[in-house]
Structure formats: structure tokens, C-alpha cells
Image (cartoon, rainbow, N blue to C red):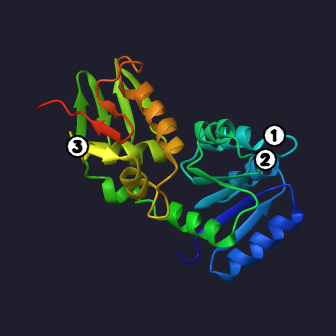
Amino acid sequence: MNNSRILVVDDEPQLRRALRTTLSALGFVVADAESGEAALDTLRGERFDLILLDINMPGISGLETCRAIRARSEVSILMLTVRDRAEDKIQALDAGADGYVTKPFDPNELLARIRATLRRAPASALAESRTLYLDGIEISFRDRHVKAGGRITRLTPKEFDLLHYFATHPNSVLTHDRILQAVWGPEYGDEVEYLRVFVNQLRKKIEPDPSRPRYILTEPWLGYRFHAPAP
């Protein structure tokens, strides 16, 4: 992961300076921005592998910035938040973040989350994946989109990772911790809210009736099961 490019977006100069110093010493190439507006300007001219994005900033909020980035980019996003309410964390995931870290954070925890996020399999590694057909719905893993009724809906990077994992482990009960560790990394296991948010997003994209799912089925207290129709 040496030379991976990270953009730190936070309105606290001391935190930006500390993260820039720490991450640069570990071999990352680090830039920073003091606001959502500055981050969006930077992203117009530079490419990054990961963005550390504060959720609570003046001007354009972290959530608004996250949505704007995700609308045009598949870059990995970790949100930094001082808010420990489940609703705030769910909002971050709904906005398109891959995950979040709560302030004040342990530097080792943050580094573990950064490394886990950067380990995402490159698209080329899955480029030969087959197209999946679910009763009139076409899921292209190569192109990362869902086509239903002539309408194409793109998958976010983490939606893609999760759906690909489901599709390659069909008709089996997959526990929460197994899914989290496979899709997010071995440092994860207790973040069940991640799965609730992303499963809900996927159901809206692939289920004829998301409130009565046919494909991504909940196994109460355990996890999920992907029901793959017989070919």
C-alpha cells in the first residue's frame, strides 16, 4: 500500500497536520483540505485512493460532500465522526461512505481501517465475473450495474463487493461476522449496522418488492442468505 494517495478533509488544522505527519511517515502520499468545498476542488484535478472525511464541518457538510464525491467517483471514503449515535453512522453509510471511525480514535484503529479499506479488490480482478440473471433483472459484475425494465442502476463500490460475495456464496447462511470480515476486512465483525444499510440499498436495486425480499433473505439473529434461482 506504499504510495497510496489519501486526502484528509477536516476543519481542524491540528488534526489534519497530525494525520498528514503520521500517514506520510508510513509511506502514504497525503494531501489535506479544510472544507468540503476545498475537497471537491482538489478532487477535480487530483486522484486519490482514499478520502478521510469529517462528517461535521461548516459550509458543505461531510454528508453532502460524501454524496457529491460518490455521484462521480468510486474512491474509497471513510468518515470521521464525533457523533456516536447509530442514526448518524447510518446516515454516513447511506451517503456513500465505505465505513466510519469515531473520534477520538486510536491511531492504530484508524490505520487498521485504512488498510482494510485499501485492500478492496481491484475491478480488474473481478472483470471476468459472470452476469447474473434474477427473473428479469440483469446484474453485470463486470460493469457494476443492475438493469431492470430497460433502466440501468449503478452499484456503489461497497454494494458491488457485498453483492458479489453473496452471489459467489449462494443458498448458504452467511453470518454477520463472516460477511463483514470477507467484504470489509478481518478488523471488522461487530458492525452489523453496516450490513443493514447496504443490504437495504441492494434490495432497493435488485428486489421487485424490497419490503418482501426474494433474493437477499434475512436469517434472524444470524446473518443473511442469498437465494439464487435455479439456472
The residue where tag 1 is placed is 60
C-alpha separation, residue under disc 3 versus residue under disc 1 = 43 Å
**Residue contact at pointers 1 and 2, CB within 8 angstroms:** yes
Which amino acid type is marked by label 1?
Ile
**Tag 3 or tag 2, which sits nearer the N-term?**
2
Which amino acid type is marked by label 2?
Gly
**Tag 1 or tag 3, which sits nearer the N-term?**
1
Q: Of the residues tagged 3 and 1, which is closer to the observer?
A: 3
| Foreground residue among 31 and 113 | 113
C-alpha separation, residue under disc 1 versus residue under disc 2 = 5 Å
The answer to whether 207 is drawn above or below residue 20 in the figure is: above
Q: Residue 225 appears at what percent x and percent y?
A: 29, 38
The residue where tag 3 is placed is 172
Q: Residue 151 appears at what percent x and percent y?
A: 40, 22
| Foreground residue among 206 and 179 | 179
Q: Secondary structure at mark 2?
A: helix
Give the quarter of the figure containing the C terminus. top left
The residue where tag 2 is placed is 36
